[in-house]
Image (spheres, rainbow, N blue to C red):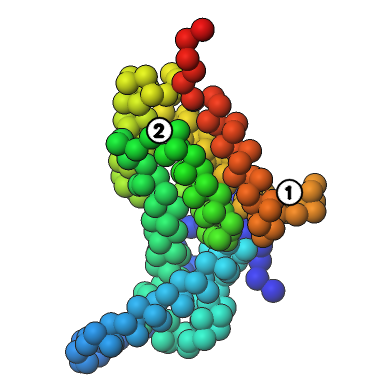
Amino acid sequence: MPRAASSGSQAGVGSSSSKTAPQHSGKRSVYPKTPRRLKQIEAKRTAILDAALGLFSRFGLHGTTVEQIAEQASVSKTNLFYYFASKEEVYVAVLRRLLDQWLAPLRALERDSDPVKGIGDYIRRKVEFSRSHPEASRLFCLEIVQGAPLLRGELETSLKELVDAKAEVIRAWVVEGRLSPVDPHHLIFAIWSTTQHYADFAVQIGALLNTGLDDSQFAEEAVRNIQRIILDGVRTRPLA
């Protein structure tokens, strides 16, 4: 059985425990990458990343082996190393893919949209992500809790740039009187924490309520209650 992930389970790329690819003799470039071949490569990479996501979210980086990823993806270890140079490279690729998916709903928040509807839609899409990608949400949480050793660069660049840009959108809505005064970053953090809770603490929710996001009725209740809590706090009210 693989070891469960612990707070000290992450290590930087190039640690002595890393398994890296065997040396190749340059044969990768022998065959031309036709559209069909490129499609096959992408399908194989996706299968490897999907398999790795499930394992990493349960056992962490060092609790997962290359052999387990290869078996889960139905490829040989040698074939896996054709696509990724090391287990750490697979892990970083998984994190980058899920970060891109995780941020997609925030990218849709535009200044020319209605603020209340835009934020309400963002909440819904975040809950839907927690419902459809619970393993991705939990892995991201695990990486952050452990100090983001392999994702810090992404957090300090692409994530920060996007969050700062959307904070400016929210700040403009406040200045225009379309939202009640609120700090944009704290609003975004509040939405993240409430929506991701349903994936990251699914076991706790199941123990307390004997249900979870896999129940469509409960998922809809979660969306509407979070929307009510958040939107009632930022919605402008007519002067008495």
Name the residue tied to disc 1.
205
Tell me the residue at 52%/47% (across/down): 124
Instruction: Choose between 12 and 199: the one closer to the eye.
Output: 199
Tell me the residue at 38%/35% (across/down): 114
Instruction: Choose between 50 and 120: the one closer to the eye.
Output: 120
Q: CA distance from mark 2 to mark 1?
A: 30 Å
Q: Is residue 88 visible?
A: no
Name the residue tied to disc 2.
115
Task: Look at label 1 and name its amino acid.
Answer: Ile
Q: Secondary structure at mark 2?
A: helix
| Label 2 environment density (alpha carbons within 10 Å; few <14, some 14–19, many ≥20) | many
x then y, percent, for residue 202: 68, 53
| Label 1 environment density (alpha carbons within 10 Å; few <14, some 14–19, many ≥20) | some
x then y, percent, for residue 88: 43, 66
* CB contact under 8 Å: marks 2 and 1: no
> 212 above or below 90?
above
Q: Is residue 93 visible?
A: yes
Q: Secondary structure at mark 1?
A: helix
Tell me the residue at 55%/31% (across/down): 230
- Taking the image as shown, residue 66 lies to the left or right of residue 175, namely right
Task: Look at label 2 and name its amino acid.
Answer: Pro
